[in-house]
Image (cartoon, rainbow, N blue to C red):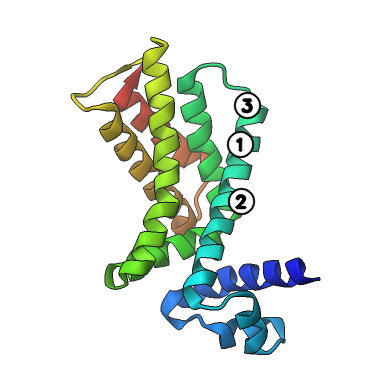
Amino acid sequence: MGSNRKNSIISEAIAATSVLGFKRTNARSIAERLSIQPSNVFYYFKTEQELTKAMLEQIVLTNNDMVEKFSEKRNPTTYRQKLASYILGNLEWAARHPESVNVLLFGICEGQSDSNLLQLISKALSQGEEKVYNMIVAGLAEGEFTINVDLKPREVAKALHQSIIGQTVRSVTEQSSVKLYHKRMTATLDCFISE
């Protein structure tokens, strides 16, 4: 029962934060959504920062799991294909989890005036950038592709990852077809990397 209640609190915190933002979401608003007392929220999460960290960990875990399963279905054999699968997997994740995208967006915006929140958001997002970087380095080492621009692999990874974030936010806010954004991201990938 305890882990189910804790997971329910995290899920409701994500749902509330996706609408209200971090600043207006609190134990009372989460408790009301679950028809429980605010003290139950504090039983599992001693501070709001602890709950925020748990929310972001859940978002990253869900993203990683979905992107990995998506990639397994496509069975990419080259690192360029793995990059493309990673990009499309993230767009699919965003389409299925718009609340999580909104939470990350609120975190980026509200983090500008809250260094603790910005640090948590940056840590969550940097994991994706590191994955992109590792795929680029592996693809270069295997001689599968080259970088088309005068940038280092870390800079290309950062640019591609920022493009992924931008397109996932756009896909949610514009509610357009994932295929449209996949085409845009494929063009972006082609701009940076040649087989």
- Comes first in the chain, label 3 or label 2: 2
Quarter of the image with the N terminus is: bottom right
Extreme-top residue of the structure: 143
Q: How many marks?
A: 3
Q: Residues within 10 Å of mark 2 (few under 14, many from 20)?
A: some
Horizontal and vertical percent for residue 130?
41, 38
Horizontal placement of 109 versus 101: left or right?
left
**Amino acid of disc 2:** Thr
Q: Quadrant of residue 55?
A: bottom right
Residues at marks 3 and 2 touching, judged by CB atoms closer than 8 Å: no
Q: Distance from label 3 to label 1 (Cα)?
A: 10 Å
Horizontal and vertical percent for residue 178?
52, 43
Q: Give the residue number, with chain letter if any, for mark 2.
A: 62
Q: Give the residue number, with chain letter if any, for mark 1.
A: 68
Q: Secondary structure at mark 3?
A: helix
Up the image or down, 105 lies above or below 63; here it is below
Horizontal placement of 27 versus 79: left or right?
right
Residue plotted at (56% across, 16% down): 77
Residue plotted at (64% across, 75% down): 44
Q: Is residue 32 visible?
A: no
Q: Secondary structure at mark 1?
A: helix
Looking at the image, is mark 3 or mark 1 nearer the viewer?
A: 1
Residue plotted at (52% across, 70% down): 50
- Comes first in the chain, label 3 or label 1: 1
Q: Give the residue number, with chain letter if any, for mark 3.
A: 74
Extreme-left residue of the structure: 150
Q: Residues within 10 Å of mark 1 (few under 14, many from 20)?
A: some
Q: Distance from label 3 to label 2 (Cα)?
A: 19 Å
Looking at the image, is mark 3 or mark 2 nearer the viewer?
A: 2
Q: Distance from label 1 to label 2 (Cα)?
A: 10 Å
Horizontal placement of 150 versus 80: left or right?
left
Quarter of the image with the C terminus is: top left
